[in-house]
């Protein structure tokens, strides 16, 4: 199905593995196209409740394939490349299912930015996150300047972007860039554990929660509160909301159907 990704889904939890281990899962145009296809496929498949993204081999992803970037000779070609990768990552961020990056190894440049486009990040204790593009005369081009400046204290975001200095797992956890740090051998298992917990929750409510959190990040308070009220009005028309409340009152586990 895919040439640069491995994909599987079990019990509502989908796993996508970047699969160019000989290139440290460097991101080329084929992988960008397949990431867009993957997100569209997950969006269309209502049996998928959560998506985990990880890397094959010893890296999550070393970022954009420099052997491809060096071939770009003019502004038009640069715009085309970065518009494609930005569109793919934006689609991932806007996917109406929760997403988890299982950062099994180094995540640099576009690899770091891919992890930033996910809702949660579980990081191996031996991994590092960085955007070193400035060291080769470029800048993060897949949303890194914007997402890092929203997720980190300004001084830390500037340090990462201006100097191209990576963050260790301990520093990433300290600054709230990742949710959990675990031994490298257990990073995918821990991410799958989070995904299974998410898969058990009511999908319509989760979808609304994700949309509202994103709106809260990007919108003013009044607009966000109005969106929250509209989402709750919708949820109170769903079977899942009624099932959840009845199960609570009846002291039993709820059975959510996504309706």
Image (tube, rainbow, N blue to C red):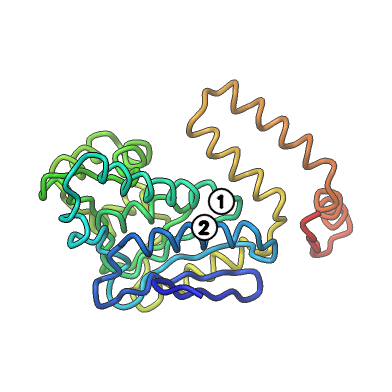
Relative horizontal placement of residue 75, taking residue 137 as reference (left or right): right
Displayed quadrant of residue 106:
bottom left
Q: Position of residue 15 (x, y in %)?
A: 51, 71
Q: For numbered disc 2, what is the local secondary structure? A: strand
Q: Which residue is mark 1?
A: 95
Displayed quadrant of residue 54:
bottom left
Q: As displayed, is residue 81 above or below residue 49? A: above
User: At 31% across and 62% down in the image, what residue appears?
Assistant: 27
Relative horizontal placement of residue 105, taking residue 208 as reference (left or right): left
Q: Residue furthest top?
A: 222
Q: Which residue is mark 2?
A: 99
Q: Position of residue 30 (x, y in %)?
A: 37, 64
Viewer-side label of 1, 2: 1
Relative horizontal placement of residue 16, taking residue 247 as reference (left or right): left
Q: Position of residue 210 (x, y in %)?
A: 59, 45
User: At 31% across and 49% down in the image, what residue appears?
Assistant: 81
The residue nearer to you, when weighing 32 against 247, is 32
The residue nearer to you, when weighing 161 against 245, is 161
- Structural crowding at the residue carrying mark 1, measured as other residues with C-alpha within 10 Å and reported as few (<14), some (14–19) or many (≥20): many
Relative horizontal placement of residue 178, taking residue 194 as reference (left or right): left
Q: Which mark is residue 149?
A: none
| Callout 1–callout 2 Cβ contact below 8 Å | yes
The residue nearer to you, when weighing 139 against 168, is 139
Q: How many marks?
A: 2
Q: For numbered disc 1, what is the local secondary structure? A: loop
């Amino acid at each position: 199905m895919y040439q640069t990704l491995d994909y599987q889904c079990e019990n509502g939890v989908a796993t996508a593995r970047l699969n160019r281990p000989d290139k440290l899962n460097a991101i080329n145009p084929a992988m960008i196209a397949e990431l867009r296809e993957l997100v569209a496929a997950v969006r269309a498949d209502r049996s998928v409740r959560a998506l985990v993204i990880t890397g094959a081999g010893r890296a999550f992803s070393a970022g954009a394939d420099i052997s491809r970037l060096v071939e770009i000779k003019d502004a038009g070609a640069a715009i085309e490349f970065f518009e494609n990768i930005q569109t793919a990552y934006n689609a991932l961020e806007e996917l109406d299912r929760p997403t988890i990056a299982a950062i099994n190894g180094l995540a640099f440049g576009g690899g770091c930015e891919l992890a930033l486009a996910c809702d949660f990040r579980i990081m191996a204790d031996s991994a590092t996150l960085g955007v070193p593009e400035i060291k080769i005369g470029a800048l993060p081009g897949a949303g890194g300047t914007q997402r890092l400046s929203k997720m980190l204290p300004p001084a830390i975001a500037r340090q990462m972007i201006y100097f191209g200095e990576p963050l260790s797992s301990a520093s990433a956890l300290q600054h709230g860039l990742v949710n959990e740090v675990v031994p490298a051998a257990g990073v995918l298992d821990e991410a799958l554990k989070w995904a299974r917990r998410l898969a058990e929750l009511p999908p319509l409510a989760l979808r609304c929660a994700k949309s509202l959190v994103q709106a809260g990040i990007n919108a003013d308070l009044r607009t966000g509160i109005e969106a929250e009220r509209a989402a709750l009005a919708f949820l109170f028309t769903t079977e899942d909301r009624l099932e959840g409340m009845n199960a609570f009152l009846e002291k039993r586990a709820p059975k959510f159907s996504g309706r």
